[in-house]
Amino acid sequence: MTQTQQYIDANRDRFLAELLDFLRIPSISADPAYAGSVRQTAEWVANNLRQAGADHVRLEETAGFPIVYGEKMVDPSAPTVLVYGHYDVQPADPLELWDNPPFEPVIKDGLIFARGACDDKGQVFMHVKAFEAMLASGELACNVKFMIEGEEEVGSDNLGLFVASNKDLLKADVILISDTAIIANDIPSIDVGLRGLSYMEVAVQGPNRDLHSGVYGGAVANPINILCQMIASLHDEFNHITIPGFYDGVLDLSASDRAAMAQTPFDLDAYQKDLGIQSVHGEKGYSTIERASIRPTLDVNGIWGGYTGEGAKTVLPSMAYAKISMRLVPNQSSDEITRLFTEHFISIAPKGVKVSVKAHHGGEAYLMPTDSIAYQAASDALATTFGKEPVPTRGGGSIPIVALFEKELGVKSILMGFGLDTDAIHSPNEHYGLFNFYKGIETIPHFFSNYKQLSN
Amino acid sequence: MTQTQQYIDANRDRFLAELLDFLRIPSISADPAYAGSVRQTAEWVANNLRQAGADHVRLEETAGFPIVYGEKMVDPSAPTVLVYGHYDVQPADPLELWDNPPFEPVIKDGLIFARGACDDKGQVFMHVKAFEAMLASGELACNVKFMIEGEEEVGSDNLGLFVASNKDLLKADVILISDTAIIANDIPSIDVGLRGLSYMEVAVQGPNRDLHSGVYGGAVANPINILCQMIASLHDEFNHITIPGFYDGVLDLSASDRAAMAQTPFDLDAYQKDLGIQSVHGEKGYSTIERASIRPTLDVNGIWGGYTGEGAKTVLPSMAYAKISMRLVPNQSSDEITRLFTEHFISIAPKGVKVSVKAHHGGEAYLMPTDSIAYQAASDALATTFGKEPVPTRGGGSIPIVALFEKELGVKSILMGFGLDTDAIHSPNEHYGLFNFYKGIETIPHFFSNYKQLSN
């Protein structure tokens, strides 16, 4: 056993206690009422990083929440690993669905329950503790830089500017990120692909005011009925998206890649049972894993219009609205998809309504080659600590800054996360396994030593 | 000129002043916060009816708001007219869209602006004042009974029981109701048909919790997308409703009836301009008037699900909901349509979701024959006071108690209303014309004398 691992074992309890403190501060970036707590969290991270032994630890101010920076340059000839993570968290509502208050962490059945336990505090903190252990043991094989932001849950608006303005400071050979999941605690995996995102908001206007549905029903276009028809038309009977040009940029997987993906362990019964559904549902010709990772999608995230209170109101409303987002795959372009959606949606509106479309933040899809040394270093590290080689998976979610990093810094990211899909991120009762927290801290030092070795 | 008309002319200002007092009391039956005001309004009506000269005026208590009753039996051999109306009003929200407070009536451009001005206080009050004038002038040709309820806007839940339990008290030859509209102030009309109503509420459940749309999007059924598809499927490309058996009960109009209906004056440009739409929209093969009156319809009155706040949230929600109502025509049955809708909606749900359906209050469609003496009496009365014969029209809205009256009392209702479609009932800035208020008071006595004459 390495000295790093001995150090980790000797300090397990303190590591956990510190994580619980980290989880207690409600760093909800989406809600202005918590702005003070978000800043407080940034300061907590900076202090902890400082105590772990990092140099030049500081808060880099932005137009929004600060980015925590710190570094340790041990050897100019060694490769440099840039660790990215975020200290902000999703809002916790609906609060009534939490078994325990979201910012009062509890440990039950080997799981740490709190908002941010997995996404991303538990995961980013593994890196700070692994760093502390490697440094204290004199076994830090690579130079390391930390860039931990506070706006990931609200679109990382200010990160791009920071990165573009600090290319020298952030110069590195690889970016290491833990904000994704493994397949299961006995089936390690590495996310080699992320889907992109295009997020639209539409409004459909019928008459210029709410109308009595008896006097006018049947004679004028009802914007809710029309919106439903327009949304329904965006998929055909095979659940294939009908927007013209939508699939043009899609890089289809080779037959061998699909065959390899089909080997990924997946328990359909358990998946359906966990979600309480009778059946999965998606694009004809693709498996569930493929539908959730290498195929683009279109989901309505929210819809509203007309009377939504108690009882009945016979109104033919003036307006109907929806938020619609699309997950994209390489090489679809987020801006191009936004344009295609907008043109198409406006074109399918019937004459009796007016339609408006606006775009929210998007992000590009991403792919990391499995023959890269970064992937090899991570794969070997997981093989060591899990006792079996990890499966390369394509993630369903988007981390837009990964494409941003490649564009601005010319550096690829390795997504070596330790969460589980069942951790309920973005949902009530989010949690993170003690197993996963400690396994991550144990694995990260192997990545560093592997990466150093493979870089020679 | 009759003495009745002289009396009306001499008391015009007082009639209006009393109406404004009536309008000031916020009798919002849907909102428990106004229960006291609703009762206060009932008492105001009873007092006014008493002062007008009616006998046995009292509040008939129900499980909800009281029904105001009063009568004048002038001649056992004369026919008896039962006058129905309601003293409760719709809620006024959204308040910010009113130019003046909804319960502080103002008169502008010959229009009385207030919630309830047309629906139904202005209209029912015409009957109380016409009665007062006829009685004071010794020209009351028929016996008259008043039944004015306080729950029409919330479904008249307790009226059915009252009517069924008081058949002797309410014995009459015809029921006279003013709660509908004429085509224009120079184009009188009588509503000889009303559409029925079936009002459904549906819920679609996908996964058992909100999910991250990146991790699960494309792999599981999104209940909002599914709900949109199910709703969209309820109409075909000709805007014909696709529920099996839906049209089975529909009594098609004869070619001559359709030809007569096509003669109804209708200004499509003005209609579209008033509503701010480029084009009307409805069932292929039918005119706008037909679509809004003699054809059944399906409208979504409200829809909601997922994230509906500011900005973007990448959620694949657990639930989606909609309120859907159908206007029915003779001889469709409200209960049967409710059953057909429920069966069909559940049957079209795909396997990845669970669907639940519940029904709110409905009502039957209604038809009054134009060769009846009641219709003739009203038609002649309008011909006298407007100088031209009225057009028989089929109304789009539902007044469910009309079918109830026929069922329980065996009596037809004549819908001799004096409102206009532009009066904005159920909307902000509801109003009623001074012209219409006084024309109604002038016309009602002619109905009474005609009806007496035609009954001999």
Image (cartoon, coloured by chain):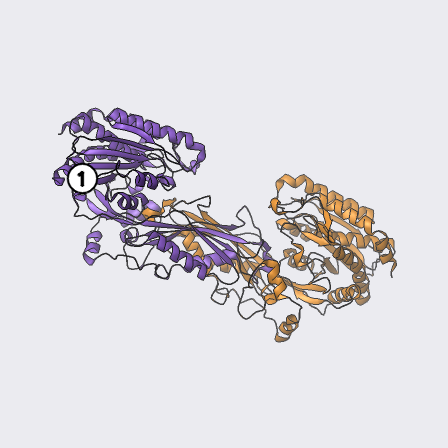
Chain colours: A purple, B orange
Q: Quadrant of residue A378?
A: top left
Total numbered labels placed on residues in the image: 1
- Camera-side residue of A85 and A102: A85
Residue B407 x, y percent position in the rendering: 65, 59
Residue B30 x, y percent position in the rendering: 62, 45
Q: Is residue A16 visible?
A: no
Q: Chain of mark 1?
A: A
Residue A316 x, y percent position in the rendering: 56, 55
Q: Is residue A138 left or right of residue A437?
A: left
Give the residue displayed 14% in from the left and 35% down from the top.
Answer: A77
- Camera-side residue of A413 and A312: A413
**On-image quarter of the N terminus of chain B:** bottom right
Q: Quadrant of residue B179?
A: bottom right
Under tag 1, what secondary structure?
A: helix
Is residue A223 shown above or below B211?
A: below
Residue B391 x, y percent position in the rendering: 70, 67
Residue type at mark 1 is Leu
Is residue A249 shown above or below A428?
A: below
The residue that disc 1 covers is A382
Number of residues whose C-alpha sits closer than 10 Å to that of mark 1, classed few (under 14), some (14–19) or many (20 or more): many
- Camera-side residue of A265 and B421: B421
Q: Is residue A289 left or right of residue B339?
A: left
Q: Is residue A212 left or right of residue B146?
A: left
Is residue A34 shown above or below A186?
A: above
